[in-house]
Image (cartoon, helix red, strand yellow):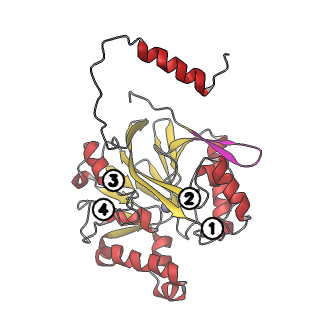
Amino acid sequence: MPNLTRRTLLAGSAVAAAAPLTAAVGAAPPAGKETPGIYRYRIGAFELTALYDGIWYRPITDKFIRNAPFADVESALADAFMPTDKLATPFTTLIVNTGRRLVLIDTGTGGQIAPSAGVLRANLVAAGIDPKAIDLIVISHFHPDHINGIKDKDNDLVFPNAEIMVSAAEWMFWMDDANLNAAPADLKLTFRNQRRVFTDIAKHVARFEPGAEVAPGIVTVPAPGHTPGHTVFAIHSGDQSLMVLGDTAQHPAVFARHPDWQAAFDIDGDAAVATRKKLFDRAAADRMLVTGYHFPFPACGHLVKTATGYEHVPVEWQPNL
Ligand SMILES: [Zn+2]
């Protein structure tokens, strides 16, 4: 292989520029905006649409991981080419068309978390999906980045015809005023946000128990730790399946590679780690396709067990369904 230096690369491009294959037509104006974030795939007879809602660079401090030195956390972030003072937190929601129901799993930030997130609705339009056509919303847990998309900033329902289903354990924990009163100040904001989203629609919100089939082919699997009622969804159609991991792990470059790390936002760190390892071991052993809400878009791929943790292997983009 020739020695590629900046000089030889530049020399090469100079040659290419000097001998164009066709006559030059002039510069194209830059588009100046991103393309829609939509990725479609199939699980058996089900058609799935991953819709990007954007990304939040969440500021972090040495309190971010409870059980690792911050220098190790900074190294992990640097190894993944990420900023070391922020956690890259992308958001990807999933729509499952079972043929009978159009199911939205988690609802994005509703444009209420960071200016760099909130493009879900634009991506819905680009994907040709009318919000009125969504007939079921299922929620993995009650953190704002998963429930805020239920309503817009004016408190109107974004998906007016959708039945909403949530974990009974999640509802019981967060909607309990004694838990709100006992919570530290920053967590109280989370409790208050849940009341903003759910209180006036409470009678329309159905609650599922662990193991419930929320729609044919979509089964809930309890995954406590991140929050008490945190739930993942196993989707089966034909001989194919997908595990929708929610926040079992946030960015895989951090939490798949370091599955023992307990983040400050995990309500029960020990349980979060145990749940993560159990589900990741199963997904790796069964070579199961998985998607994670905070995995890089399109957020689906496989998990490989390594000597120290897991590695996420993203799917290849398929131009045909
Ligand atoms: Zn989340």
Residue type, label 1: Phe
Q: Secondary structure at mark 3?
A: loop
Image quadrant holding the C terminus, namely: top left
Disc 3 versus disc 2: distance between alpha carbons? 20 Å
Nearest to N terminus: mark 2 or mark 4: 2
Query: Which residue is the site of mark 3?
Result: 119
Q: Is residue 192 magenta?
A: no
Query: Which residue is the site of mark 1?
Result: 64
Nearest to N terminus: mark 1 or mark 2: 1
Q: Is mark 4 within 8 Å of ligand 1?
A: no
141 to the left or right of 261: left
Q: Position of residue 145 (x, y in %)?
A: 43, 63
Q: Are marks 1 and 2 in contact (CB under 8 Å)?
A: yes
Nearest to N terminus: mark 1 or mark 3: 1
| Marks 2, 4: nearer the viewer | 2
Query: Which residue is the site of mark 4?
Result: 163
Query: Could you tell me what secondary structure mostly forms the magenta stretch?
Result: strand
Residue type, label 2: Leu
Q: Position of residue 84 (x, y in %)?
A: 62, 57
